[in-house]
Amino acid sequence: MNPNESAKSHAKPDIILTGTAKTCPNGPPLGLVDIGSSENAYLFRVALPGVRHKCNIKFDIQREGRVRIEGVITESEALKNSLKGYEMKVQQLPSPGPFTISFNLPGPIDPRLCSPQFRTDGILEVIVMKYQIPLVSAEGLPENWYNGSFPAP
């Protein structure tokens, strides 16, 4: 690995925020991203404070490793159902509204093999398998292909 590749693999990913994720200046930041890597998979965690239900988010992962998360932060039930309007004196949580978060994983993945979990602390945690290029033998068959013959004793 040359020095440029090493620097690129440890560089911070470009993260694009829109909507509430971009305009919330205070409080727990929406859209903080952690990315980890193992031999066979990537793990990413995204902070989604204010998102109460996993049905308020959806995400799309593309084979080249592009991740896009869309969601809506809903108004609290106390504010929504109140007969008196509340004037917020301090607001450090993200404002209600839609948001998107987009970033790239370090390499290609298999989007069919992912395991998402929306934690109770507002963290979306996803493990997705890296894309494995099948090894091909000299005969053009995958190396783990079984041709039905047994080795001679």
Image: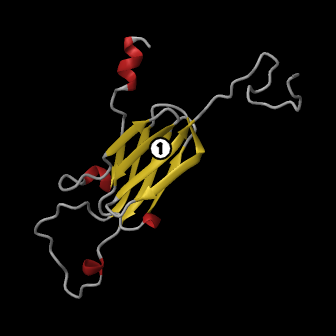
Residue lying furthest left: 89
Lateral position of residue 137 relative to residue 125, left or right: right
Above or below, 4 relative to 121: above
Above or below, 110 relative to 11: below
Coloring scheme used:
secondary structure
Please provide percent x and percent y for residue 64: 55, 34
Residue at 40%, 25% (x, y): give it. Answer: 9
Residue at 55%, 40% (x, y): give it. Answer: 129
Location of mark 1 (residue):
67
Label 1, secondary structure: give it: strand
Q: Which quarter of the rendering shows the N terminus?
A: top left
Examine the image and state in which quarter residue 134 appears.
top right
Q: In this orientation, which residue lies closer to the viewer: 149 or 127?
A: 149
Q: Which quarter of the rendering shows the C terminus?
A: top right
Please provide percent x and percent y for residue 36: 40, 38
Residue lying furthest front: 153
Please provide percent x and percent y for residue 76: 29, 74
Please provide percent x and percent y for residue 112: 61, 47
Which amino acid, by three-letter code, is at mark 1? Val
Residue lying furthest bottom: 83
Residue at 15%, 74% (x, y): give it. Answer: 87
